[in-house]
Image (cartoon, coloured by chain):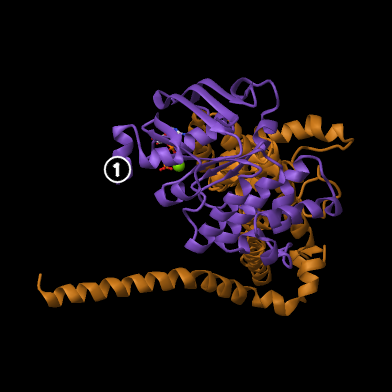
Amino acid sequence: MEDTKISIQNLNLWFGKLKILNEINIEIPEKKVTVILGPSGCGKTTLMRTMNRLVDLQGNAKISGKIMLDGEDILNTKRDITLVRQKMGLLSQRPTTLPMSIFNNVAYGLRLKGIRGRKKLWPHVEKHLIEANLWDEVKDRLNDPASRLSIGQQQRLCLARGLAVSPEIILADEPTSSLDPISASVIENQFFKLKENYTIVLVTHIMRQAKRIADYVVFMYLGDVIEQAPVDEFFNNPQHKMTREYLRGAFY
Amino acid sequence: MNYKTRKLKDQLVSLWIRFMVLLVVALPLIIAFSLLYKSWLILGHSSLSELLFSSVWRPLAGEFGFFPFIVSSVWVTFIGLILTTPICLFSAIFLTYYGSRHLLRFMQPVIDILAGIPSVIYGVWGILVIVPAIGKYLAPMFGYESSGFSIMAGGIVLSVMLIPFILNILIEIFRTVHQDLFDASLSLGASKWQTIKHVVLRKSFAGIVSAFGLGLSRAFGETIAVLMVVGNVVGVPENLFQPGYPLPALIANNYGEMLSIPMFDSALMFAALLLMVVVVVFNIISRRTIIYLESKH
Ligand SMILES: Nc1ncnc2c1ncn2[C@@H]1O[C@H](COP(=O)(O)OP(=O)(O)OP(=O)(O)O)[C@@H](O)[C@H]1O
Ligand SMILES: [Mg+2]
């Protein structure tokens, strides 16, 4: 099997008294697309937010277990968590452009890394906008506010912005669910190319999308991981009864 | 009830509602026109520039220069706003992003209570605490002699009165900034404070401007509390520890006493008109600013 990039071990998470994640064990392979499937409310978003330690900000969250990233437990790291977060780009359900120009959206993370001055930032910004397949559409209007872009363009801008801090992992939480079909397929195709260089974790509700781009599938239900398998095995020969029901659409 | 009476009722209600709406729209216009009508006398007597920029205030001799009052009003408002701005901004940021949920839940009714305290009580508190503190400590610290009744006292009392008003709006504004946006910035490697500084404040900038714009209008018109501590001496104050005499105090102190002199009566109406124009203009400017800022991102 491939190298493991992230290994989640016996992860439990509570919000107050409510247990949201229950004994999660997942191996996420490097430079592959791992898709997380599961009905609404089963804890997919929470799992993602635990992986880049955003859950910490919710005062009532309690966590146990380990998340090993390149052999280091990021839940108990002594390093600055902002550095850990920079290893993972985040793409959320609705595009969340920062309230600034297109250029500055991409430059934001770079500036935080200490790269200053438009001249120095320029080549990076261009490179990542190209990488996110947005450059041709925005190259003449980089100083426009990002909010003037279409929703599909905004999501690609968010992708470029995330790529700019050179993460190793991309966490995408239903990144195409608010997009029109064409923008959605642009993002999807981008993931295909990106997996050569990045480890991608993708949450989706769209079964066809999972089939198209997943290498590896994890199925969750009510805070438990029910089944995890390579994509062909998962769809053609699911082991668990609950998985079969989910694939038949029984949960909708 | 048959169809006809129902229809009649319906029409009556709709007529009544229309009348009420019209009244609300017309009220400020009616007030402005009656003030203008009443100040017509003084406007015919002295030129506008004389009224606004002359410092000679001798009502009995028929000389009405409003400059000292305008300067006092501007200073008191300015000080009030300057002092309240950091307090409100930082408390709102702390309460929404750093304090626990319990603290916010505890603070919200406290803020509402502060907002509901009658201004005369703030005035009394100013006389008891702020005025002596200025007279004894603050003014000597800066090398001035002061009774304590001063522009500074008015500004400080005003700043305290503005806190609940502005703080409430700011908390509301910060709460509308979406969690996703916060997450996006953090995931790019920003710290919490960097996120607040570069994203939250920028995203809510228009709202913040409007909060302080509304505060400004309110401060400019605040009467009783300021009147009680500001000293009410006519003259352009040379420093902030000297007494001043803002426009609302002028009107409140004199209206009803000197009505036998029509020109004085008219002068006070002009002061009221001035107050109203300034407040309306502030409101329009802050609204314009919001629209402009919102179009920027
Ligand atoms: N801050 C919080 N405090 C308490 N409960 C929470 C909090 N955030 C999420 N939850 C709960 O945790 C559970 C999992 O939520 P989560 O958002 O992870 O689900 P999800 O699988 O992403 O669902 P969806 O597919 O609808 O996005 C839900 O029951 C939700 O109500
Ligand atoms: Mg979710």
Q: Position of residue B272 (x, y in %)?
A: 63, 64
Q: Tell me where residue A203 appears, x and y as whole percent.
A: 48, 43
Q: Residue furthest left?
A: B2
Q: Is residue A137 above or below residue B174?
A: below
Q: Colour of chain B?
A: orange
**Quarter of the image with the N terminus of chain B in it:** bottom left
Of all residues, the one furthest to the right in this rendering is B143
The x and y percentages for residue B225 are 62, 45
Instruction: Tell me the residue that label 1 is attached to.
Output: A251
Residue at coordinates 32% horizontally, 32% vertically from top-left?
A240
> Is the residue B2 above or below the residue B118 in the image?
below
Q: Nearer the viewer, residue B10 or A9?
A: A9
Q: Residues within 10 Å of mark 1 (few under 14, many from 20)?
A: few
Q: Is residue A146 left or right of residue B236?
A: left
> Disc 1 residue type?
Phe
Q: Residue at point 82% right, 44% down?
A: A115
